[in-house]
Image (cartoon, rainbow, N blue to C red):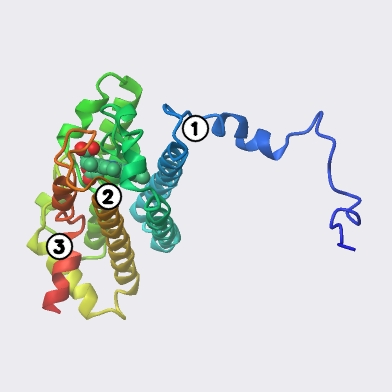
Amino acid sequence: MRDNPFENEKSIHTDFVENMTYGDYLQLDYLLDSQKRLSNHHDEMLFIIIHQVSELWLRLIIHETKGAIEAIEQDNLRASFKMLARVSKIQSQIIHAWDVLATLTPAEYMEFRDKLGNASGFQSYQYRLVEFVLGYKTPHILKIYKKEPELYAILEDAYCKPGLYDVAIRALSRHGFAIDQAVLDRDFSKTYEKNASVEKAWMDVYRNVSVYWELYELAEKLVDIEDWFQQWRFRHMKTVERIIGHKTGTGGSSGVGYLKQVLNHYFFPELWELRSKL
Ligand code: HEM
């Protein structure tokens, strides 16, 4: 006879007339009612869920990165490490999501692709928020959200604020490294461009690891995040190639060609360049 694990558990709660359930707390009725297929195709469910799961993780990435920015600004680097490490773990999760999506064949996707119209991940405002908090500010993106003032305001705010790398550079300056004033006072609505004083400061950190252990750890956490970000971009590009080949995207870009080009961008350029010079 098989054991019934519930038999000996006399205290399991079953009366929820008054009390909050798991589903209430997580608003599962709302969450699980949000997978509205536009076709009858079986695989459209996978397509919707993979995007929704990615968006949920992006939400946490933004939350953790903003927390890390605040902690770095308060010189609480150890607290920021915890949050930045969590960001990397999430990135590893969403990279594995490509394995699930890669089970979608080109023939299957073609059966419901036209239902998407011009909708594309290109319009993911959370993805752009991640890029903004990491310091990559692309002006043409804001235009997409002109018709949604609340969203526009959130994006514009992140667009104009210092990103993660800016606050790391400010931390270098507070630790006595000579950083050009033009970098510290830069217009944060512009994408960060590499600078010799910043590279020199990081070089000093990497050459004197035991003296600047916390700044060194911060730098390596940033490299982790950029490394994972690039892996996500690469897996996206390859999965797209596998599913639609070199067709143009629903968002209107050249598709794989565009996604390959985005791979050339660096968030934290000096941290990569110094590796050739150490
Ligand atoms: C069958 C699956 C997918 C295909 C064929 C696909 C295709 C594309 C294409 C062609 C682009 C370039 C813009 C365009 O013209 O549309 C793009 C951009 C993008 N996609 Fe996907 N995608 C897929 C799945 C996903 C998933 C699961 C996510 C997760 C959120 C995602 C997020 C994005 C993002 C954020 C961009 C903008 C990238 C950038 O501008 O750097 N995509 N996608």
Reply above or below: 250 against 278.
Answer: above
Residue labelled with disc 1: 35
Reply above or below: 88 against 123.
Answer: below
The residue sitting at 31% across, 20% down in the picture is 149
Question: Distance of mark 2 from mark 3, alpha carbons?
Answer: 16 Å
Q: Give the SS element for disc 2.
A: helix
Q: Give the SS element for disc 3.
A: helix
* Label 1 close to label 2 by CB (< 8 Å): no
* Label 3 close to label 1 by CB (< 8 Å): no
Category of crowding for the residue at label 2, using alpha-carbon neighbours closer than 10 angstroms: few (below 14), some (14–19), many (at least 20):
many
Residue 5 got which mark? none
- Callout 2 amino acid: Leu
Residue labelled with disc 3: 198
Question: Distance of mark 3 from mark 1, alpha carbons?
Answer: 46 Å
- Callout 1 amino acid: Gln
Q: Give the SS element for disc 1.
A: loop
Residue at disc 2, CB closer than 8 Å to ligand 1: no
Towards the viewer: 78 or 43: 43
